[in-house]
Image: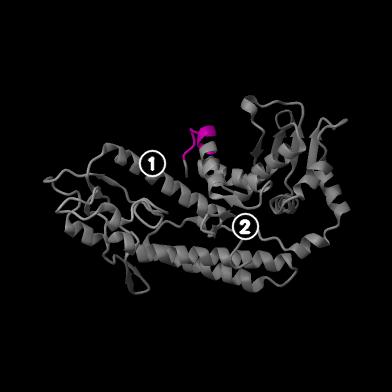
């Protein structure tokens, strides 16, 4: 489990992915499919597929080519049969960055054959070996997976009370390899892809934690302003609600380990129904807007995830991950449709934010 991490998005095929991978894939796929639907509405029979460097080999063979939508043109091959358009593996499918545009017979193509050939040339040299952009990018993705793997291993060993020095050394080793790789290729290092958001939590460690001690810590951590009366939200109630899910348990452990103060405020009322926000390493919740223990707990998970991500970048991507973790408190495995709904919600609530 520490090697592969927690897989939280399940597709109809049964394949599972981490939230970060699924969000990234969903947005790339969604943008291209939207553009493709616009082309569908134009009704032009001949289309020309776009081209870019670093395309996966099975897509590179049809990029920059001209096809017939109907499959009846004598001079051009069938569009769907050639590109797999409409399928997950084909054009505009999973993680595909290609698109297509109307082509009018007799006009010059956008890409010459010489330009297409140059897209696949091995222009990067790593350790004396020439690589294409696709090969180089694949190598970078591999390094990132290894860094995440050994970070998970280090977390798991520490949670089990075992010596994590070997795993920590592996993390440093792969980080050094990544630094060397980007120095040789000139690629930008994408630190977000190297982060482990699965936060592997060893069950035995959780079992060793005394419940009374945790309740006392909850009282110290969750400050109610003004002090609660009657049926108001209580610190102990928040702690018990967090214990209902693995995401909640992990969130509470992160709060305690990083000494994150959480203030539940009954005095102030945020505009537009805002339920909470973060300020540095602090979390603030507007109890008048959350109203219930459940909504307060979900807001805490959402805001603490912002701190865990460590970005504070105000992007739709970051908000999508926070909403996903919040929803996982209610259902541990999200579906692909859950993820699509989250992305739609984020785009509606934060239209002023960029995706990344």
Magenta-colored span: 346-354
Observer-nearest of 172 and 28: 28
Query: Up-down: is 307 above or below 173?
Result: above
Give the image location of residue 356, x and y in percent: 47, 45
Q: Is residue 55 left or right of residue 202?
A: left
Residue 54 is labelled as none
Question: Relative to 151, is 27 on the left or the right?
Answer: left
Of the numbered discs 2 and 1, the one sitting upstream in the chain is 1
Name the residue carrying label 2.
198
> At 14% from the left edge and 54% from the top edge, which residue is drawn?
75
Q: Residue at x 65, y 43 (%)?
A: 302
Q: Which residue is mark 1?
A: 34
The N terminus: image quadrant: bottom right
Nearer to me, 193 or 169: 193
**Quick one: SS at disc 2?**
loop
Q: Position of residue 245 (x, y in %)?
A: 72, 51
């Amino acid at each position: 489990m520490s090697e592969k991490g927690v897989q939280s998005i399940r597709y109809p095929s049964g394949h599972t992915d981490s939230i970060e991978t699924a969000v990234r894939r969903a947005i790339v796929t969604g943008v291209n499919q939207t553009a493709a639907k616009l082309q569908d509405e134009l009704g032009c029979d001949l289309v020309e597929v776009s081209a870019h460097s670093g395309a996966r080999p099975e897509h590179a063979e049809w990029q920059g080519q001209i096809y017939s939508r109907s499959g009846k043109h004598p001079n051009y091959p069938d569009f769907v049969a050639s590109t797999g358009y409409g399928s997950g593996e084909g054009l505009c499918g999973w993680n595909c960055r290609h698109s297509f545009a109307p082509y009018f017979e007799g006009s010059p193509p956008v890409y010459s054959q010489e330009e297409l050939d140059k897209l696949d040339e091995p222009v990067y040299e790593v350790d004396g070996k020439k690589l294409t952009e696709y090969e180089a990018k694949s190598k970078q993705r591999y390094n990132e997976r290894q860094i995440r793997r050994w970070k998970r291993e280090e977390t798991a060993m520490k949670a089990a009370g075992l010596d994590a020095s070997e795993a920590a050394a592996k993390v440093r080793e792969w980080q050094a390899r990544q630094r060397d790789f980007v120095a040789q290729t000139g690629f930008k290092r994408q630190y977000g892809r190297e982060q482990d958001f699965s936060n592997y939590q060893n069950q035995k460690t959780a079992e060793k934690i005394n419940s009374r001690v945790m309740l006392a810590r909850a009282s110290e951590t969750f400050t109610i302003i003004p002090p609660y009366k009657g049926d108001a939200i209580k610190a102990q109630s928040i702690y018990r609600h967090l214990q209902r899910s693995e995401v909640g348990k992990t969130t509470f452990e992160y709060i305690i380990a990083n000494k994150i103060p959480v203030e539940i405020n009954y005095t102030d009322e945020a505009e537009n129904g805002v339920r909470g926000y973060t300020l540095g390493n602090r979390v603030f919740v507007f109890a008048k807007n959350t109203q219930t223990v459940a909504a307060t707990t979900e807001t805490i998970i959402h805001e603490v995830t912002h701190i865990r991500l460590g970005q504070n970048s105000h992007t739709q991507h970051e908000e999508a991950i926070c909403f996903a973790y919040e929803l996982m408190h209610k259902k541990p495995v999200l579906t692909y449709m859950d993820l699509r709904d989250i992305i739609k919600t984020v785009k509606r609530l934060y239209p002023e934010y960029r995706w990344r």
